[in-house]
Image: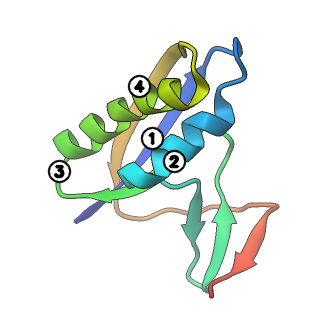
Amino acid sequence: MSRFIACYDLNEANSPHYEFLEAARPLGWEGWILSSSNEWNRLPNTTLVGDFASMEEAVNTFKAIKPAAEKKLGAKITLEKWIVAHYTTATFASDKKVPKS
C-alpha cells in the first residue's frame, strides 16, 4: 500500500463540505494524519490522505466520493478542481491535534 494525498475545491452551493468528508471515510480517505509523535493532526479543510494499492485505485476512490456525498446531501455537488498525488514523506503542522488512542 502507498500513501496518497488529495486536494480539492468544492463549489459553496449547498454547503457540501461535511457530506464530502463523511462520504470520503468509508472509501479510505481521511482528514487527519498521524505524526511521528503519535498525534493525529487535522489536515487543511479540503485535503485528504489515504493508503491505496495504486494511483488508479486512489483516483477511482476519490472520484467515488462525489456521488456518495451527493446521495447524503440530496443535491448536486460541483467538484471544481482536484489533484491526487503519491507521497512518501511529509512535513506538516496543525492547530488541531489529538493523541493516538
Query: Answer yes or no: do the residues labelled 2 and 1 have beta carbons within 8 Å?
Result: yes
Q: Residues within 10 Å of mark 4 (few under 14, many from 20)?
A: some
Depth check, front residue: 37 or 10: 10
Q: Give the spatial CA distance, label 3 vs label 4.
A: 21 Å
Q: Give the spatial CA distance, label 4 vs label 1.
A: 17 Å
Mark 1 lies on a secondary structure that is: strand
Q: Earlier in the sequence, mark 2 or mark 3?
A: 2
Q: Give the spatial CA distance, label 2 vs label 4.
A: 17 Å
- What residue sits right under mark 4 in the picture? 67
- What residue sits right under mark 3 in the picture? 54
- What residue sits right under mark 2 in the picture? 48
Q: In the image, is 68 to the left or to the right of 20?
A: left
Q: Earlier in the sequence, mark 2 or mark 4?
A: 2
Q: Earlier in the sequence, mark 4 or mark 1?
A: 1
Q: Residues within 10 Å of mark 2 (few under 14, many from 20)?
A: many
Residue 36 horizontal/vertical position (percent): 56, 82
**Disc number placed over residue 80 in the picture, else none:** none
Mark 4 lies on a secondary structure that is: helix
Callout 3, which amino acid?
Ser
Residue 7 against residue 32 in the figure, above or below: above
- What residue sits right under mark 1 in the picture? 6
Residue 50 horizontal/vertical position (percent): 39, 56
Q: Earlier in the sequence, mark 3 or mark 4?
A: 3
